[in-house]
Amino acid sequence: MGPMRIPLVAIVLAGALAVPAAAATAPAPTPTPPDLPEIYHTITRPLCSALATTIRPAVALMMQNDATIAKSPPLFGDYITMSAAGSDAGKDMSIHRLNNLVTPLVQNTLAIQKLLEDPSIFPPNPKNEDDKHLLELKDEMLKTLATQQASLDIINGFVETQQLGEMQHEGFGYLRAITGQTTAPGENAQPNINQGAQQAQPVGGLQGGPQSGSQTPQAFDDLVLQAGLQPNQYEIDPTRIPGLAVGYNQIGKLKEGLEWTQDESKKSEAPLSQSIVHAAKICGAQLGNPSPKP
């Protein structure tokens, strides 16, 4: 029995020594990464989402329209000055510059109308306070847009009337040579446009000039802006702009009409700005408190 104890002790010692050796060579456990801090936890409200995706771009387009319309009264003034000076080239340049204002105004107005007609943003039947706020914003934006459309009507009506007048008189020089007439048809009915600013040539303040057999002006947006879109309930009849009437209007009156629409636009933009600021404050209050963790 004695000799057999040595191998048994050796085996026990070997096992005891092997345990710490194995423990020393085992890899250390990977520490669990700390949880990332949550900075904000928010839920986007329909009102706040609409401010970013619809209201803001629509307002930006309206601001562009204001800047474009502001260029038109001086151009009407230039046309009157060139008429008084008898400069056909100067008048043509004024018409060309006014014509360049029409396309961006049309494009922006169409884009604004499309944004405001999105039923997913502006539900026809409000179901909560957010819906009511959005419909109020839409209503105020349509009022502002209506004044800008009235400005567009005046600018485009003047440009198209002048361009049509030039087309009607093209080639009359050849007719005089053939017929021996000293005046072209209808020229006697035209007033002298070189009698100064107060005697400036009357031009159509509405598209296409007077409409025979009709008491309703053929507004520009009836032809283009309302194609496939809902009509603006706040649309301004250009004939109701102070100083303007159906048919022909003196250029000075058109300039005054534009200035009137600009003033009306400012009046409608004031409550719109207040409503947007109020909505922005509501959305600002919805932001979660920052996490105390760094």
Image (cartoon, rainbow, N blue to C red):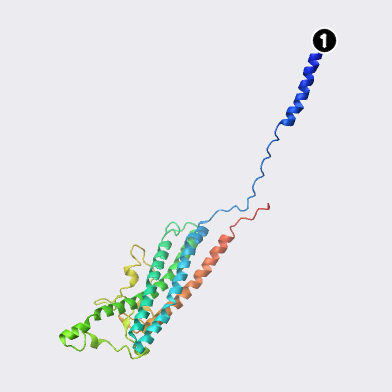
Using the rendered view, name the quadrant where residue 18 is placed. top right
Indicate the amino acid at tag 1: Pro
The number of numbered badges drawn on the structure is 1
**Residue 42: percent from left, percent from top:** 58, 53
Instruction: Give 210 or 26, whichever is nearer the viewer.
Output: 26
Which residue lies most toward the bottom here?
195
Could one spot residue 53 in this view of the protein? Answer: yes
The reply, left or right, for residue 166 in relation to residue 28 is: left
Is residue 199 placed above or below 75 in the rendered structure?
below
User: Residue at 50% of width from left, 73% of height from top?
Assistant: 270
Q: Judge whether 16 appears above or below 260 on screen.
A: above
Q: Residue at x 18, y 85 (%)?
A: 177
Tell me the residue that label 1 is attached to. Answer: 3
**How many other residues sit within 10 Å of disc 1, few (<14), some (14-19) or many (≥20)?**
few
On screen, residue 6 above or below 272: above
Q: Residue at x 26, y 78 (%)?
A: 167
- Secondary structure state at the residue bearing disc 1: helix
Q: Position of residue 59 (x, y in %)?
A: 47, 67
